[in-house]
Image (cartoon, coloured by chain):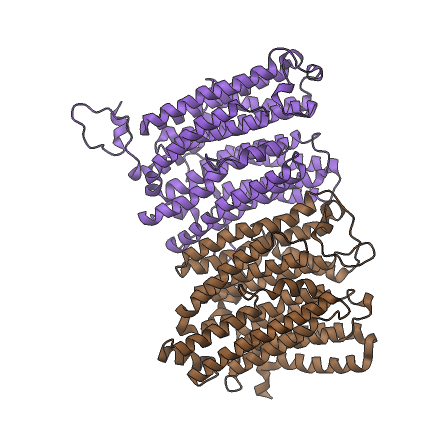
Amino acid sequence: MNQFAPILPELIITIGAIALMMVAAFGGRRSGGFTSWASVAVLIAATVALAGPPTHAGGVFGGLITADLFGSFGKAIVFIASAVAIIAAHGWFERDTEHSAEYSVLILFSALGGAVMVSATSLVTLYVGLELQSLSAYVLASYRRADDRSAEAGLKYFVLGALASGILLYGISLLYGFTGTMNFNGIAAAFARDGTSLGLLFGLVFVLAGVAFKISAVPFHMWTPDVYEGAPTPVTAFFASAPKVAAVLLGTRICLDALAPATDAWRQIVIFAALASIFLGAVGAFGQTNIKRLLAYSSINNVGFALVGLAAGTPQGASSVLFYMAVYVVMTLGAFLCVLWMRDKDGNPVEDIAALSGLSQTRPGYAAAIAIFMFSLAGIPPLFGFWPKLLVFQAAVNSGLIALAVAAIVGTVVGAYYYLRIVKVMYFDDAGEQLGRVRQPVQGALIFLAAVAVSPLGYLLIGPLQSITDRAAGSIF
Amino acid sequence: MGSEVTELPLLTLLIGIPLIAGLICLFVSASAARWIALIATLIDLALGAYLWAAFDPSGPQWQYVENLPLGGGISWALGIDGIALVLIALSVFLMPICIGASWNAITKRVPEYMAAFLLMEALMLGVFAAQDLFLFYVFFEGGLIPMYLIIGIWGGAERIKASYKFFLYTLLGSVLMLIAMIYMALEAGTTSIPALMAYDFPVDAQKWLWLAFFASFAVKMPMWPVHTWLPDAHVQAPTAGSVILAGVLLKMGGYGFIRFSLPMFPEGSAMFVPFVLVLSGIAVVYTSLVALVQRDMKKLIAYSSVAHMAFVTFGLFAFNRQGIEGAMIVMLSHGLVSGALFLVVGVIYDRLHTREIEAYGGLSNNMPGYALLFMLFTMASVGLPGTSGFVGEFLSLVGTYKVSSWAAIVATTGIILGAAYMLWLYWRICFGTARRPDAAEMPDLSVREWWLLGPIAAGVLWMGIYPETFLRPFRADVGRLLERVERAAPAGDMALTRGKPQAPAEHHAPEAAH
């Protein structure tokens, strides 16, 4: 029994997901409400179970996965974000009688995949976790099967995702072939021993390309706007949060653990991906009229900043990445919860930015929340979104990457333009057709919590959060 | 009194009161919001007056110090010296006037308007009181959000373009400063501003750090050629927005130079003295000429602001007491005078709803009280002895003359040009006969407007007749600043040499001329 203690959270989710799948299969449509709340409960239980052995047991199962604070930190974010994504779907699918209970079960499986991703210390577990996470995600993207856009999103995601998996697998096979081991430590030892041979370099590039696809970093971002736009909004909220965190943390662990001796080799790739993501994410969002597409570009842009921290390649850099992702998830989930509330008079979802016109006059609180998320995503102080950006720049400057920091920070100004545009539409434009009212106290409370967390009050969290991320980052070095 | 550790965190209160009042404003009716805003700003004014009264000019450099570490390399560290004190006083003095100026002029979305102004006040005060590098940045940048909203929601016809320009322009200027700050925190191992002011950065690095800070402060100031956001922002902003923009926000640039650029990078600053003098010289002449041809009153005053701020940079980068004290007085004086001039424009704009100079004329006939005050502020802007403008500009010119006589000559033409555009403006608006019948029927100042302009007029005269009151708090701080920068002070070209020229004897050269 003891050897299972470090993976208790994963076990809880596995058993819970399988049991709920049975409930969904035999309970039919009526079980939707039950499975969704039960899934939230499972995720919360898993989060609570993170305390103890799952956080400090170290490598288990012959080094296939490790139970450390880094992984636990990532899992906590993934589980909570998944729970929010399940809650976000309340009242979304019911209207179309297609909210079968499988939605929350799929999210559970995806969260499980994410949990394996952040704690994997072997290329095999990494791949298994990634595929489990992705396969659930493909189904989720096309969840609204009667909707052409949703089906298209699912197909696109699947085809491109399969391609990326192939690339990743090819990289894994090269790394395995040239090092003779799947284990991160073994790979690191081989890199340190043999130097970066051509074969290893190829393996490294392919693995990073696969990861870049999953985190939607430029130049592997093309799927993101289409999938984000086409997928049902709660699913988009999920895509922008949990899987993204899992993939970024996975990339961080690979780079700083398995590929640590080859830092010079991967750093240039990460720097390119970071700057390209920041600028393309900013410029690509300019002409968008669909808010989900805009937030897709925003997520590309934000991943770029997280990569700036990764490029530093130091414990401080890893800590800043963790901090960044934690705050990013709060901001982005808050923003998507607000997007979920965009309904017309009949309750049909609208995604046009113009629908927000003059929102500050008709729904001041709602508009203020969106404005807080936008300014925070843009990284404008005194909102809390500024602080993680400062941390990644600090990590980069401390590693001597001043030019990178300067280029990235100029990117924030470019990006600020389109976030401002949302604020402008809400605050400066005349009120257009009013949005319908949505009565969802739970979501409302979540939006409020997220808005408070990224408001200047968030600065009070710096101390505790920073000490956790520092220790978490220390656990992979 | 001020030297002893005060039990009450006065500076936190000073910042917190408007913040909390602003939050309350969001949830009340329009008239309640007006009153809450007025009361909150008056409390802050009283607090500011107490700070001034209890401040000990001969005491320690930093008074009312508070420090609360937040972890992760940022702390809620506040504390002020004389320089910050007078600028805080200026801010809290102008705020109730701004609220009063918006009393009737703003009719839509009043609660949000008052909340934005109160948030603005809290952030401005934070800029002057912050003693932590990153806390300063948070306040400095945070001010963009309320100002963006003020211009964008309550501004004129072109408000959206102006708000974007204001926001992105100043943001672009500031972000490079953040990278410089990160480097400084790493290099010096501290984020405490007082500690950094005593830290000697490598001269090589100073050059780049100075440029990064300059990018930010020059835009904020604004200096030619990065001033173009200012006329747009001023013209489109509501009257009170212009007042606060000209009165306080522009001072953040000058404050930044005094607080950061000069003491932290003395060598870097000295290296760029010619550069600053050239930019300031161009600013004085060019923007004065541009001001001459404006048809829009607000635009004219906006351009005059750029010209006046050039006197600040002239004085600051003169590296001597007269220059720096002069620059401080110019900042205070300009804060009062340009604020008052925007109010003066606002008064007739509220009546006729046009800012075209041509629409007015002969106002001294039907608005004698108005014409009197307008005359006073015009003269103060021109720099007539007896008004605050004279003291500041004269000192700053004396300081400039010591470092470069050519710069002083160019700067002095700015005073002449300033007289030209201001007096011509006054003549076109107040003298002659009314060009439009409705302009001739405008009533004179109301009691409320007297209350807005009267205190500023008193301040302008006070500063002009007895500037010692305003010089005293920061005299010692200017002395400390001079000690810090004198090792890098440029030689200056006005030292008389007899016979064969000898190597300029560094900073003693100016005194040798007496």
Q: Does A390 sit above or below residue B340?
A: below
Q: Is residue A313 visible to us here?
A: no
Q: Quadrant of the C terminus of chain B?
A: top left
Q: What shade does chain B have?
A: purple
Q: What shade does chain A have?
A: brown
* Pick the front one: B461 or B169: B169
State which quadrant residue B504 falls in.
top left
- Say whether residue B258 is left or right of residue B430: left
- Say whether residue A99 is left or right of residue A300: right
- Say whether residue B143 is left or right of residue B184: right
Residue A191 pos. (x, y %): 39, 78
* Pick the front one: A234 or B128: A234
Q: Is residue B441 visible to us here?
A: yes
Residue with the most extreme bottom position: A1
* Pick the front one: B251 or B271: B271
- Say whether residue A213 is left or right of residue B496: right
Q: Does A109 sit above or below residue A225?
A: below
Q: How many marks?
A: 0
State which quadrant residue B39 falls in.
top right
Q: Residue at x 70, y 80 (%)?
A: A16
Residue A105 pos. (x, y %): 71, 76
Residue with the most extreme left position: B500
Q: Residue at x 74, y 67 (%)?
A: A148
Q: Residue at x 41, y 28 (%)?
A: B326
Residue B462 pos. (x, y %): 51, 22
Q: Residue at x 56, y 35 (%)?
A: B245
Residue A442 pos. (x, y %): 75, 62
